[in-house]
């Protein structure tokens, strides 16, 4: 090979090295940009959006004509830890919404020390007629987790999790008159309307056993059947719909928790379709179709405290007669 050819070969090799170095630098910049964007999303989700509490209001046109309207306040997935003063202050103001009935669909606490501050914050609402069901994080403390683990599908239940003082919490609710619907049914009269409630223990832990709605009894003719559960698994929604529910309330999904703007939830942490991860939709089974209200929840697990494109919420349901 002549000197000219050697020189040309060296120059070509130099150009290839330069292109490789340039490509490596570009890849490093892109990786850094993605990492920075991800870190920014996590910071926004933890510091801003997870604390950006909202009240969503819906109207349920399911009362018989002429019946007096009433208001349900649906609380779910509070996941309280005692240091969350902004959440406690917001909870304590929800009584200003003047509900006639409170429905609590579980996952109230995130630590053993959360029971007392939660009860103080909810104190005005505990004077309102209420019903509740448990969630898994009423029973067990959360464990550390990557916030993005939520996107991998339904969470697994570790048998070695620390038990929380759920009996203390539930006893306090019941002492103030809230009905425990853990695989139980009850009836109560509100504004002259008979409300038949039936609920389940947490389906995510496999503790659900559908009790059916109460049968006819003394008092006003049945007006509404309300199904209540923590995790909206299909088997539970089907049983409630087939059993004659007029409306079903659930939580657990966190609305997807980490959502895509313009698209919505990627997961529901159960077998509910993602488009029903939060909001007022419908559920059909056995030839019947009923309203399904799924709350996006008020908190997150303290070990994965991030929300994105999914504000924490309490839900107001104004129950009225058809127009």
Image: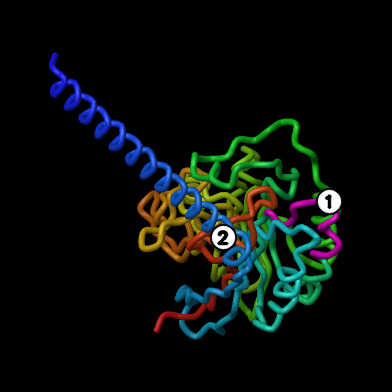
- Name the spot of residue 213 as percent of width and height, x first: 59, 55
Separation of residues labelled 1 and 2 (CA atoms): 25 Å
- State the residue in front, 107 or 37: 37
Instruction: Using residue 254 as the reference point, say whether residue 145 is left or right of it.
Output: right
Instruction: Using residue 223 as the reference point, say whether residue 28 is left or right of it.
Output: left
- Name the spot of residue 149 as percent of width and height, x first: 55, 41
Considering the numbered disc 2 on the image, is that residue within a helix, a strand or a loop? helix
- Around disc 2, counting alpha carbons within 10 Å, would you say few (fewer than 14), some (14 to 19), or many (20 or more)? many
- Please name the residue shown 41% across and 57% down the image: 260
Is 108 above or below relative to 157?
below
- Name the spot of residue 13 as percent of width and height, x first: 25, 27
Q: Which mark is residue 135?
A: none
- Please name the residue shown 78% across and 77% down the image: 124
Residue at far front of view: 3
Residue 159 is at least partly visible in this image: yes
Q: Which residue is mark 1?
A: 112
- The span shown in magenta is 107-118
> Looking at the figure, which quarter contains the N terminus?
top left
Q: Which mark is residue 45?
A: 2
- Please name the residue shown 59% across and 61% down the image: 297
Considering the numbered disc 1 on the image, is that residue within a helix, a strand or a loop? helix
- Around disc 1, counting alpha carbons within 10 Å, would you say few (fewer than 14), some (14 to 19), or many (20 or more)? many
Number of the front mark, 1 or 2: 2
> Looking at the figure, which quarter contains the C terminus?
bottom left
């Amino acid at each position: 090979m002549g000197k000219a050819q050697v020189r040309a070969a060296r120059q070509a090799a130099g150009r290839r090295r330069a292109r490789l170095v340039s490509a490596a630098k570009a890849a490093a910049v892109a990786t850094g940009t993605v990492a920075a964007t991800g870190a920014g999303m996590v910071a926004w989700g933890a510091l801003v959006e997870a604390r950006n509490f909202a009240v969503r209001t819906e109207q349920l046109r399911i009362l018989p004509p002429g019946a007096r309207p009433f208001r349900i306040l649906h609380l779910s997935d509070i996941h309280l830890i005692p240091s969350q003063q902004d959440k406690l202050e917001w909870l304590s103001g929800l009584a200003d919404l003047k509900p006639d009935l409170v429905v609590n669909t579980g996952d109230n606490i995130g630590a053993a020390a959360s029971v007392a501050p939660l009860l103080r914050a909810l104190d005005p609402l505990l004077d309102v007629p209420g019903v509740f069901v448990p969630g898994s994080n009423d029973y067990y403390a959360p464990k550390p987790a990557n916030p993005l683990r939520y996107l991998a599908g339904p969470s697994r239940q570790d048998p070695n999790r620390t038990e929380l003082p759920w009996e203390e919490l539930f006893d306090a609710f019941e002492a103030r008159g809230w009905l425990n619907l853990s695989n139980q049914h009850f009836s109560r009269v509100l504004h002259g309307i008979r409300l038949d409630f039936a609920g389940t223990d947490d389906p995510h832990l496999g503790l659900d056993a559908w009790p059916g709605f109460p049968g006819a009894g003394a008092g006003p003719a049945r007006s509404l059947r309300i199904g209540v559960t923590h995790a909206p698994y299909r088997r539970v929604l089907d049983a409630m719909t087939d059993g004659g529910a007029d409306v079903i309330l659930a939580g657990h999904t966190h609305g997807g928790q980490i959502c895509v703007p313009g698209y919505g939830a990627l997961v529901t942490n159960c077998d509910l379709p993602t488009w029903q991860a939060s909001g007022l939709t419908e559920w059909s089974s056995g030839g019947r179709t009923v309203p399904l209200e799924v709350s996006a929840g008020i908190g997150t697990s303290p070990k994965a405290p991030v929300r994105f494109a999914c504000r924490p919420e309490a839900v107001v349901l104004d129950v009225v007669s058809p127009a």
